[in-house]
Amino acid sequence: MEKLQLIALIQAYTGVGIGLMVGLGALGACVGVGIMCSRFLEGAARQPEMIPTLQAKVFLLLGLIDASFIIGLGIGMFFAFANPLLGALGG
Amino acid sequence: MAAERELTPNSYIGHHLTFFQHPVGEGSFWTLNVDSLVTAVVLGFVGVGFLWWVVRGATSGVPNKRQAFVEILCDFVDRQAKDIFQGDRKFIAPTALTVGLWVLLMNSMDFLPVDIMAWIYENVLHLHNWRGVPTADVNTTFALALTVWLLMIYFSVTVKGLGGWIHELFCTPFGVRPLWASPLLAFFNFLFNMVEYISKPLSHSLRLFGNMYAGEIIFLLLWMMAGAGLAGTLLAVPLGLVWAIFHILIVLLQAYIFMMLTIVYIFQPPVQHGRIRLQAAVALAAAVRQHVRGRDHLSAPVDDGRGRPHRRRLGGRARRGLGDLPYPDRRAAGVHIHDADDRLHLHGA
C-alpha cells in the first residue's frame, strides 16, 4: 500500500511536469511562429515578387522554431510511457 | 491485433515502441537496434540505387519522366546549395542530395499504417517488435547528426588549418584584448564555442527524432482511442485524418530542414572564412534588388566612351546665351527637363 502511494505520487508529479513541458513549449512555439509569419505577411505585402523566395524560408524557419517544442514533446512522451523516475522504487 | 494477448493501453503502446534488439557486447551501449539498422540500410540502397539506375540510362535528348524527375530533384538540391555556398559545389550538392533523400525515405516509412505493418512484420516476416521508422530511433538521427558534426569540424580545419581552427576556438567571439585578461577571455571564448559545438548536433538530431517519435506516439494514441468502441472510433478517425495530413507536411519539411542544416553547418565556416562571403552578399543583394529597381535597361547619362558623340548642336541663340560649353555634343547632366513621372515604371520605383 505504501509502495502504491509512492508510485501514485511520482506519477502525479510526472503528469504535472509533462503538462508544463508540452504546454509552455507550445506557448513559445506558437508565439514565435506567429511573429515570424506576421513578418512574412508584411514583407509579402511590401514586395509581392519576393513571395516564392520568402515562402521557402518561412517553411525552413517553421521547422527550426518548432524544434525545441518538439524535443520537449518527445521528452514528455518518454516520461509518459517509460518513466525513469519510477526506477527509484525498483518498479 | 492478436487476440491471444491481453491488450491493455500500456501493452499496445509498449509493443509498438519496443525495438528488435541484438546485443553484440555488454550493456545497453552495445545493443544494436537491428530493425532501425536494417531498414535504414535497405532504404539507403533503394534510394541511391534508384538514382543510379535512372542516371545509368540517362540521355541528353528529350528525357523520359523518370529522368525528368531525378533532374528536378537534383536541380532543387543544387539550387538550395547555391543559395548558401557560391563556391565549388562538387562535394556539397551530392552530400545534401544523399542526406536529404535518405532522411526523406526513412521518414516516409511513417506513412505506412502502424497496425497493418505490425501485422505484416509479425505474420509474414515473423519478426516480433520490429519498428519500421528508422528516424524515430534516436540512435539513427544521432548517427546522422554526429557524422555531419565530424564533417563540419573536418571542413573547418581544412579551410582554416589546424592552428587557425584552435586559435579561433579560443579567441572568438570576444578576442584576447586586453592582454591582462586574456586567460579569462580565452575561457569564455572557449565556453561560447563549446555551447555552439555541442548544441548543433544535439538540436540537429533531436529535432528530427522528436518530430518522428511524437508523430508516431500521437498516431498510436489515436488508434488506441479508436479501440475504445464506436464513439472512440468516430472521434479518432477524423482526428487521425487531420494528423496524417499534417504529418505528411512534417515528414517532407523535416527532411528538407535536415538537408539545409547539413549544408549550412558543414559549409558555413568555409564561407565565412573567405572573401566569398562578401562577394556572395553583394551578388545576393544585386539579385534581390533587381526585381525592385526595374531600371536596368536605362543607362546613366555618363560618357563611357562607347556611344557616338551626338552632333546635336544647340541653337544659335542658346549657344550665344550660354557662352562657351566644354562638351557641346554631349548632354549635360541635370539639364534634362522632365515631368514628375518620367522614368517611373509599374513594377519599380
Image (cartoon, rainbow, N blue to C red):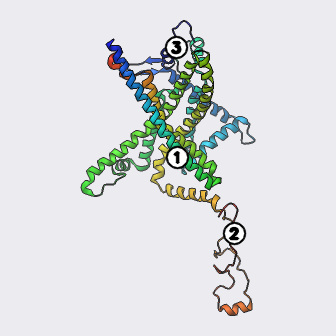
Instruction: Spot the residue most to the left.
Output: B180
Q: Residues within 10 Å of mark 1 (few under 14, many from 20)?
A: few
B293 displayed left or right of A77:
right
Asked if badge 1 and badge 3 are on a common chain, one would say no
Residue matched to label 1: A35
Instruction: Spot the residue most to the top.
Output: B4
Instruction: Spot the residue most to the front.
Output: B231
Residue matched to label 3: B128
Quadrant assignment for the C terminus of chain A: top left
Callout 3: helix, strand or loop? loop
Which of the marked residues, 3 or 2, is nearer the chain's N terminus? Answer: 3
Marks 3 and 2: which is nearer the front?
2
Marks 1 and 3: which is nearer the front?
1
The answer to whether any part of residue B29 appears in the image is: no
B310 displayed left or right of B6:
right
Callout 2: helix, strand or loop? loop
Q: What residue type is labelled 1?
A: Ile
Marks 2 and 1: which is nearer the front?
1
Is B295 placed above or below B55 here?
Answer: below
Residue matched to label 2: B343
Q: Which of A89 and B184 is in front in this view?
A: A89
Picture coordinates of residue B243 (x, y %)?
A: 59, 29
